[in-house]
Each structure stands twice: as C-alpha cells, then as structure tokens.
Image: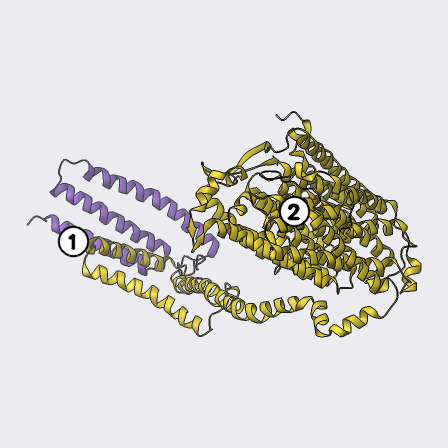
Chain colours: A purple, B yellow
Amino acid sequence: MHPGLEHYLILSALIFSFGVYGMLTRRNLVAMLLCVELVLNAAALNFVAFHRFLFEGDPAGTVFPILIIAVAAAEAAVALAIVIALFRHRRNLDVRAADTLRG
Amino acid sequence: MTGSWFLDHLWLVPLLPFLGALLIALVLRPLTSPRVCSGAAIAAVSGSAVVGWGAAFAYFAHHTGETLVPWQTLWLAFTPSFAGNVGVIADDLSMLLVMVVTGVSLLVHIYSTGYLHGEGGYSRYFASLNLFTCSMLGLVLSVSILQIYVFWELVGVSSFLLIGYYWDKPSAVAACKKAFIVTRFADLGFLLGVLVLSAYAGGLDFAHLADPATIARLEGVTLLGTSALTLAAVLIYMGAAGKSAMFPLHIWLPDAMEGPTPVSALIHAATMVVAGVYLVARLFPIFSATPEGMTVVMVVGTFTSLFAAVIAVTQFDIKRVLAFSTLSQLGYMMLALGVARMESPLGYTASLFHLATHACFKALLFLGAGSVIHAVHTNDIREMGGLRRKMPITHATFLIACLAIAGVPGFSGFFSKDEILAAALHGGHPVVFSVALLVAGLTAFYMFRIYFMTFTGEPRDHHKFDHAHESPPSMWVPLAILAVPSVLLGFVPFGSFVYRGEVEHAGIDFAIAIPATLAGLAGIGLSALLYGRKSGAPAKVAASLGFVYRAIAAKFYFDEIYLFVTHRIIFRFVSAPLAWFDRRIVDGAMDLSAQASRLGGAYLRRMASGRLQTSLLLVSGGAGLLMLFLILAGQPLFIALSVAGYVAIAATVGRQIVLLLLGRTEPLKRITRD
C-alpha cells in the first residue's frame, strides 16, 4: 500500500506536536532549539506533501521548503550565537533562570 | 488721513505706556536704579499725553461731531461677517477721556515720585502705573465692544496690582482681592450683555452697534420675556456699575483706599471708576432706545449718589470720605445719563462735563489728601487740624477743590452740576432733581467738614502737627496745575464739543442755579457752624441721632450683609456642595479610572513572568483564540465570549463605584509602583 496524503499530514501533525510539546516543556535552551527545527520541518513536510498530491507542477510547493531550510539555517546561526552568549553570561542554559524580562 | 500727525498716530497713545511698563518691568527694574524707572515711566506717559492732547486739539478744531477711526485691524474673525476689530477711535467721547486720562496720569506719575520716595517696590509701582495707563487708554479708544472688554479686564488687573501695592499689609491684600472679585463678578454681567448684544446685532464694532438701523432691528427682538435690547443694556450696565461702584456693587471702592493715595487719585477718582460712565455713554444710542434700561441707570445712579453722600458725612478717614464722595459723584454722572435720551441729550453732555470737572477736582482732592497724609502720617481727620499754617499750598489747592465740588458759582463744579440738575428737571424727573439738589447740599457739607477738621482750628495732635511740613515740589506742582482746571474748566463751552443729537441750550438757568447754589452754601454754612470752631456740637448731634447715626457710620452694615451672604449662605449652600461634588464625583471618577487601570494592570502583570515558555504558551493560546475568532465570528459562542468580557469590565468598574460610595477609594497620589 502506497502512503496517501493523509499519512503525510498525520506524520507532519505528529512532528509539529512533538516540536511544540518539546518547546513548552524542555528546560534546556539547545533542546528547545531542536524542537523549533522539528516544527519548521513539519511545516516543510506539509508543503512537499501538498505539492506531491494536489498541486504538482506549482513551483511554490518546492520553493517554500527550500526557503524554510534557509530560514532554519539562519535562525540556527543566530539562536546558537544567543545560546553561547547566554552560556558565557550565566554558566548554564536553563531557560527558567533567564527571566530578566519579568514584569 | 486726517490731516493731523497726532490723529494719524493716535495708536501711540496706549502703546507708549505699554512699552514703558514692559521696559521697566523687564529691563530697567533689574538693571538700573529706581530713579531711572520713574523717569522712564514719566517719559512714556508724557509722550502719550503729547500725542493724546495734540490729537484731541486737532479733533476738536477740525472734526467736531465726526467719528474717525485712524487705525484699526481685524483681530478675531469668528465668521467673515462677525468679526472683532482692534483699533483706535477718535470722537468727542474718546478724545475727552484721552485728555483726562493722560493729563491726570502724568500729574499722578510726577506726584508719585515725591509721595513714594524711598519706598520699597518703587519701580514695580511705576511699571504697574504705566500698565494701568495703557489699559485705560486702550479702553477709551476701543473701536469694538470686544476690545473694550479686553481692556476692561486689563484695567481691573492693574487696579488689583496697585491696590495691593502694600502687599505686606493684610488689609491691603484683602482690599485688592475684594475689588477684583466684586468687579469681576459684575463683569460676568458685562460679558453676558456683550454676548446678547453682539449675537442679536450681528457685529461687535461700535460703528455697527450704534447704527440706527441695527437698533431699529434689535427693538423688535424679544428674549426671556423682555426685549433683547433691554436685557443687553441691563447686563452691560451691571458691568458698568461694578467698575463705577454703583449700589449695590459699591463695597469695593472704600476699601480700595488701602492703595497708595496717588493711585486712589488716578484710578479711584479720575479714570477707572468713570469707565462705567464711559461705557454707558459709548453705548448711548442703545441705552437711549430702551427706556427701561435708562430707568435702571437713573434710579441706581440717583440712589447711589444719595446713599454714598449720607455715609460720607459720618466717616473720619479722609480718604474714605473722598471715596464715598466719588461714589456719590459717579451716581450723579449716571443719573445724568439716565435722564438723557437721543431726543433730549442734555444729560449726556452734562454727565461727561461733570466727568471732566470731577476728574480734575477729585484728583486734586485726593492728591491734596495724600499730601496731608504724607505730612502727618495718619488718615484720621480727628488727629489733624490747623494744618493751614504748615501747608499753605496744599491748603489753598484743597480749598479750591472743595469750593469746586461744593458747586460754588465760578468754580467748575458749579457749571457741570447745574447742567445735570437742568437735565434732570427738563427731562421730567422732579424727584431725581430734588434728590440731586439734596446731594449737592450734603456734598458741600461733608467736604467742608473734612476741610475744617484738617486745615483750620487748633491742632488736635501736637506731636503730629509739629512734624508736619509742606510737601516737596514734585507733589505741590501737580496740585497747583490741577487747581487751574478745577476753577476754569467750567467756562469751556462744553456743549459745543461733546454732544449727541441736537445741541440744546446749556446756559445758566437761574431757576436751577440759585437753589443749587443755596444748597451748596447751606452745606458749607452748616459745616462751618458745626466744625468751624471747636465745639461739642457734632458729638451732640451724633448722640441725638443714636441708632441712625451708628447705622450710617457702619455704612448701613453693607459689608456685614455681604459677609453674611457669602460666608453663611453661598459658602455653605453653594460652595460646600460644589466642593463635595468636585472631590467625590470629579476626582472620584479620575480615581476610578486610575484604579481600574491599576487593578487590570496588576492582574495582567502576572502573565509577564519573564519565562520564555510561559510567553510561548500565551502566544499559542492567542493563536488558538484567533482561530476561534475566525471560525466562530457571528456564532453564539463568540457573542457569549464578548459579553463575558464586557461583564468583566463592568464588574471592575462597579466594584470601584461601590468602594467610592463607601469612601474607601484610595486617592490618586497613593498609587505607586511597588
């Protein structure tokens, strides 16, 4: 049996949910960044799945995943720089400790 | 172009004292000596006087009877057809007042250099005096009722400053506040009158207001059950009565004597207090068209003239006697205006004639009294006496002024009073005529009472008498100058210069002149009998009158009545509820909104924990709500959510209102960030 569109969507939703769950629960900043990558890739998978099954030939379905990969790379570079700066500053990466913006 | 440099540059007349006041207050007072300040003030007023008198002579020589507007400009255009101009007007009325104001003001400036020599605040005094002169000149030269209102208030402010010159004396502070509040209260009526009049007449310029067509149109309009013209006239008269201290708004003028005596001479005898007379005269065509309004003017004027004359008889403070005398004479001018009509305008001329002569002899009386006070350092005539020998020039000029105000034939007051009496009798008001005649007698009596008590007989207080001396030339020269018009002004054929409508015959009518002269002489004679020699007669007369005398001496208890009305009635039943309303409702509403925001903020700030993941959860929750909004817009669930939001807001406000009513709200100032 070949996998259909719904299988890809279910997989994508699962990856997205894992990503969001991880973002909300993991205390380590690097782990949170990994979860962000999961969320982004879930979205990219959606694009590819829709392109393959419903809009074959439409360039948007291929351009957007590539764009997402590029954005993810840029985001990773910036976020890792922040992570390193934070680590140098505080000597740990627990996000609960970084609450300088408390109201 | 009017063919005269002075008339063309009439705008310099109010401008020069204004620049003088600015220069003294901002530059000369901090940087130079008081002498430079007074010199600059005198120079400014002299310039103003030269231009003013030059313009007046040019006007009366070539333009009598015309109304010229040498300069005006649009100031406030409410609508294109309803605009207020500022400018300078040249007609008989304004030119007369310019001569009086600049002349008396210049003499008072010179006199003040002697009177206030060496006192603190000397430069401030001259700056205020210049400001006053500017305001008064701006007032008399106004081309629109809006301009007159502005300068009217400026005059009030500068009068306030000058009455309160001795600001370290509590009585002077109270007096200046009293003068300001009472006249301000009257100006409320003036403002309403201006609004009514200009709204129905459709313009603010005097040229438009005094136009017979405008008045004819106004006569048909009714407002609040009376004619709009009458209503406007009575309201404007309220403002005039406040400035001219007509009964029952007279209470501020006697207290205003707390100011320096030259100020009393300038403001409270010759210029500011005649602003009311000027205003009625300026709007004479309007007042003339409303017999009811004119009756109010006449009755109030007649009553004030008698009322004040009776009080003046019992006072012992020399300046207060003169103040009540001023009230009485202002009543005279008002009653003369009140009996005049466009058809029989003798009273108009008579009133302004008396205004001019009164300005001379009353300023002279005040300056003479100032000279006496300067010499003996007291206001109380019971501590004076015999000063004739010590102060010959002051004595001679004071006597001339007394003779003038008493209406002795040959002196200026005789001619102007005679004209007022003639106007009253010919206008068909025998009661007014008899009261005016009685007042003439009373005037002569109380003026010679202070004359005899001050200058003749034996000195009552030898210590003060021994220190008395004639005043310096800067003080007696203005006295001597003022004495000249006090005698001679009566011989000016006034009726051919200042008039409205047809000029009437204004010669001496012996049927009037003889009783008037007799009344004056009787007053002088009675005064000489009672006060000419040392005797116990005045005390006996006072004792035999008992309660009546005490009531008159206490000014008919009017100050007490006003105090009772303000403190016991207005403060308690009007001000206290208003204060409660202000504190509880107005401030309460402010507290309510502040505390509602604060409460909301306190709840909201718990969400801003600074934790990355809490924020993330809220963002996700927000996105979820947004999705709900997109899916459910218009659905019952969404409406229920919105209603719940409003209920929450209403509940917060309601809670605060309950706290407010229980008096448990926190004042705004206690809200601090913790």
Q: Say which quarter of the image contains residue B531.
A: bottom right
- Residue B42: give x, y in percent of width and height: 77, 40
Q: Nearer the viewer, residue B602 or B241?
A: B241
Asked if B203 appears above or below B657 in the picture, the reply is: above
Residue at 71%, 74% (x, y): give it: B547
* Residue at the far front in the pictured view: B511
In the displayed structure image, the side of residue B598 where residue B47 appears, left or right: right
- Residue under numbered circle 1: A10
Q: Amino acid at mark 1?
A: Ile
Q: Position of residue B406 (x, y in %)?
A: 76, 53
Quarter of the figure that contains the N terminus of chain B: top right
Q: Give coordinates of residue B562: x percent, y percent.
A: 61, 66
Query: Callout 2: 10 Å neighbours few (<14), some, many (20+)?
Result: many
Q: Is residue A21 above or below residue B580?
A: above
Q: Which residue is mark 2?
A: B351
Does the rendering let one see residue B205? Answer: yes
Return the chain for callout 1. Answer: A
Name the residue nearer the viewer: B15 or B287: B287
